[in-house]
Structure formats: structure tokens, C-alpha cells
Image (cartoon, rainbow, N blue to C red):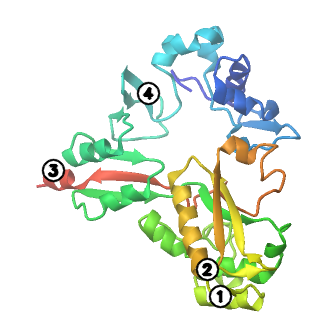
Amino acid sequence: MGHGTPLTAADSLFAYELARSGAFGQEANARLALLDRYEQIDEHTTRAVLKPDFTDPAYITTFWTPLPRHLLAEVDAAELFESDFARAPVGYGRYQVEEREAGSIRLARSPYATALPTSVETIIFVFRDDTEMLRGAVAGGSVDVALIEQPTPELFNATQGDTSLALSAMPNPIWEHLDFNLDVPLLQDIRVRRAIAHGTDRQGMIATLLGNTGNPLDSWIVPGQWAAAPADQLTRYPYDPETAKRLLDEAGIVDTNADGLRETSGTTATLRLYTTDGSALRLAAAERFRADMAAIGLGIDIVPLPSDQLYGSDGPLYRRQFELALLPGSLPDSTRLGALELRWCAERRQRLDGQ
């Protein structure tokens, strides 16, 4: 793990045991609340056993990042964050902490990572919460690469046409999906569900919100995985608002008073869409979806909720008191649509250095 000591599953179990002492804060306690137990299977394997009544989608976070038992076993858990280890932690990658200051960390190549060779001797991480400041630092040459985990549409637009920067997007294992509650009579008609699918301009969302840095998914199993079906074996729903309108007409959902919204059983055909309120990107996608549905005559009421309310045992998802839900999903491999990580590189600086 560090100082030449091998990393094993026992170090992950040790991190879990430390967290159970109550010293790791609210986030760790929330993860612990999902677990019945966490155990070591063999030298390289751990197992998380969830409580039978868990409802939190954060179950995928219940793996515990290993901590060095051989260095911390005698350290009081209450004093861990003030210990020498907290200031200069030991890891198991290519680099180790060499220096830590307010707002930055300097890493040096680890002499123990002989199986992971690298030619880069040092890496300096600088932490800033202002994306414009980061972009300016890259353009000015004081930073080589800037990474932003959840870019906003405004950020994509601001970067377009900036020839001093090379912008790349890396897939993230989170994808966005729209869920239907089939207890809702309106959504029990497959023509309505197909109309919503054909009426949603997913590629347009990607162009507007993600700068054309992704592709819509046709299955929750992404292309390239062994279980992925060939494209010609999947039912696909290309953007086709005219087909969407025809399907709604066939379902008897029509606009009888020429107000732009269709009616069903004498009432306006409006659906309530629940989503989380913590993601600017997801809320922007919800607004785009509302505009797409308005174009085919369906009304959408967007209801953003904090995650704990949306996913909680008293929330609309658990109690099936929703009609539509726009939610993040997680896949075991990279995806083509969803939250992205953005990376800026100082292309101008690289050109100058090469002259």
C-alpha cells in the first residue's frame, strides 16, 4: 500500500471499521446506514451486505477505500484528521504526497509503484471553485489541465470558438433516464409512451446542453460491452414529432379547444415530472423535455426535490406517487450520455513550446 507494504482487502475492511467508530462524519454515517455488515472474503475481495429495507440509490458507494492498517491501527480514530497521515497520506498508486498547502497538493512519483511506470515526476493539484478562473489559468499557462466534473450548458457555450483551449469530454458512469409510472392511466397506453419517446429530442439536448459530446443510448447496456445487443435488434425511437402527434391522435388525446394542449377524459393532458434539484444539467434537460412535450401538445409540470426527499421512504418514488421521473442511473462501464467530465488543455501553450 505504501512504504512497500502490499495492499489487501483487509485494508478496506479496516476503513469500514474506522468509519463505524463515528469519526468520519455525516457522509460516512449515511453509507453505514445502508449496511448490515461489511466483510472480507479473501485477500482481494470484500462484500457489502445491505439492509433489507434500504431505499437509497447510493448503495453503489458502499465499497470502502482502503486505509493502511499497518500505519493507523494504533492511531486514535478521533485524532485521525489531525495526524501525520492526514497531512501526508500513504496511497497505492503511481504517486505519493510530497507537499500540501492551502488550496494545493504536490505529488511525487512513488518509488514503490514499479508495476505502474510513468515518466512524469511531479503533479500539482490546484483546487478552485470558480470555473472561469480555471479556464483563465489554463489559457494563461499557469495550469496545464483543468477538470470539471459537472459542466453547465453555459460553460460549453463559453468555450465554443476558443482556439487557445482544447476541450475534451470523458464518459462518466452516470446516465440520465426518464421513468414512467405505469399505475397512471394515461401512461398505460403504449401509444402515449411511444409518443413521448418519439417527441423527445435527445440529440438536440446533447447538442445544446453537452456541446455534442455524447450520443443517446438505445439500451441501458452501452455499446462495446459484451452483453450489448446489435443495433438492428433494438427497438429505437428516433426524434419524430409528427409520429408522436399521430400516436396521440390515435390514442384519442387531442386538442379540442385550440389552446395548444391536448385533452384526455375532459381534462388537460399534463404530466408531473419529478427530478432532483441539485444538478443544473438535469434541470436544464427537464426544461428541454418540457419544451419538446409542449411541441406535441402535452403539458409537463416539473417538480424538483432534494435527493433525500425524492428517494426517501416517504417520497414519491418509493410510494409510486409520481407520473414521470428524470433520474440519474449508474452503469458498470462508461456511458455515452449523462454527466460528463470536462478537461481543458492549454493548446496554445503546447504549440508555443514546440516552436
In the image, what residue occupies the spot 83% across and 37% down? 49
Residue flagged by tag 3: what amino acid is it? Asp
The residue to which callout 1 is attached is 245
Q: Residues within 10 Å of mark 4 (few under 14, many from 20)?
A: many
Compare residues 352 and 23 and report the one nearer the observer: 23
Assess disc 1: are there few (<14), some (14-19) or many (≥20) residues with their C-alpha within 10 Å of its C-alpha: many
Query: Does the rendering let one see residue 337?
Result: no
Q: Is disc 1 placed on a helix, strand or loop?
A: helix
Quadrant of the drawing holding the C terminus: bottom left
Where 355 falls versus 110 (above or below)? below
Between circles 2 and 4, the one closer to the viewer is 2
Query: Which of 122/251 is in front?
Result: 251
Look at the picture and state if 118 lies above or below 2: below
Query: Mark 4–mark 3 contact, CB under 8 Å?
Result: no
- State the CA–CA distance, disc 2 to disc 1: 8 Å
Question: Which residue is identified by label 4?
Answer: 96
* 289 horizontally vs 8: left or right: left
Number of the front mark, 3 or 2 = 2
Upstream in the sequence, badge 1 or badge 4?
4
